[in-house]
Amino acid sequence: MKKDIQISYEYFKNSSELSDIEKKLFERAKEAREMAYAPYSQFLVGCSVLLENGEIYSGNNQENAAYPSGLCAERTTLFWVAANFPNVKIKKIFVVGGPKEFHESNPPIPPCGACRQSLIEYETKQNENIDLYFSSMNEEVVKVHAVKDLLPFYFDSTFL
């Protein structure tokens, strides 16, 4: 038996098409990206998170000379938010990434697999979808209405 999976997403040609709160998240993620510590890969990523209480927090990728010891922007931000606001739901996550030397042709940069798995943990925990946006510095934006849309065969606590 063959089955298909469809993923619905929205595409924005540039940030001017975003709502006011989405623009704010985009700007905060861009600002966080500029402060990323990525001396080895020169690949800078910023992330911003909107909580249900209206607060916005941001973070960025942090590399290490021992490569596996670094951490992506999404997990840096997510883990800090979860540690400080464990019972506050996450409404939106915005990721802006790309090479330090930006090129107009860079496509929107989605979260890596490890970040997708970490993000799905919190979407599952709060039992509510999280809007996820990803972009590059050229301001093209992709929006999915749930993290699970990017990781349809996810692993969660129901398997344990």
Image: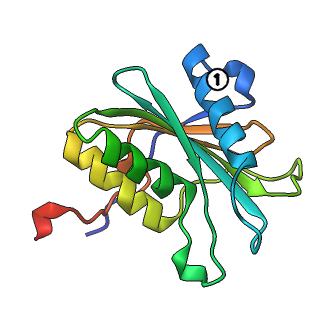
| Front residue of 158 and 153 | 158
- Reading the image, the residue beneath label 1 is 23
Q: Is residue 98 left or right of residue 5?
A: right
Residue 44 visible (yes or no): yes
Residue positioned 60% across, 15% down in the render: 20
Mark 1 neighbour density, 10 Å: few (under 14) some (14–19) many (20 or more)? some
Determine the residue located farthest toward the front in the rendered image: 84
Total tally of numbered discs in the picture: 1
When asked about the image quadrant of residue 152, the answer is: bottom left
Dot 1 lies on which element? helix
Q: Is residue 9 above or below residue 34?
A: above
Q: Is residue 108 left or right of residue 127?
A: right
Where the N terminus falls, by quadrant? Answer: bottom left
Determine the residue located farthest toward the top in the rendered image: 20
Kind of residue at badge 1: Lys
* Percent position of residue 15, x then y: 72, 26
Q: Is residue 147 left or right of residue 2?
A: right
* Percent position of residue 153, x then y: 31, 63
Residue positioned 33% across, 42% down in the render: 84
* Percent position of residue 61, x then y: 61, 59
Q: Is residue 16 above or below residue 109?
A: above
Residue 6 visible (yes or no): no
Q: Is residue 70 left or right of residue 45?
A: left
Residue positioned 73% across, 38% down in the render: 140
Q: Is residue 14 above or below residue 111?
A: above
Where the C terminus falls, by quadrant? Answer: bottom left
Residue positioned 29% across, 33% down in the render: 89
Specify the color scheme.
rainbow
Q: Is residue 160 above or below residue 85?
A: below
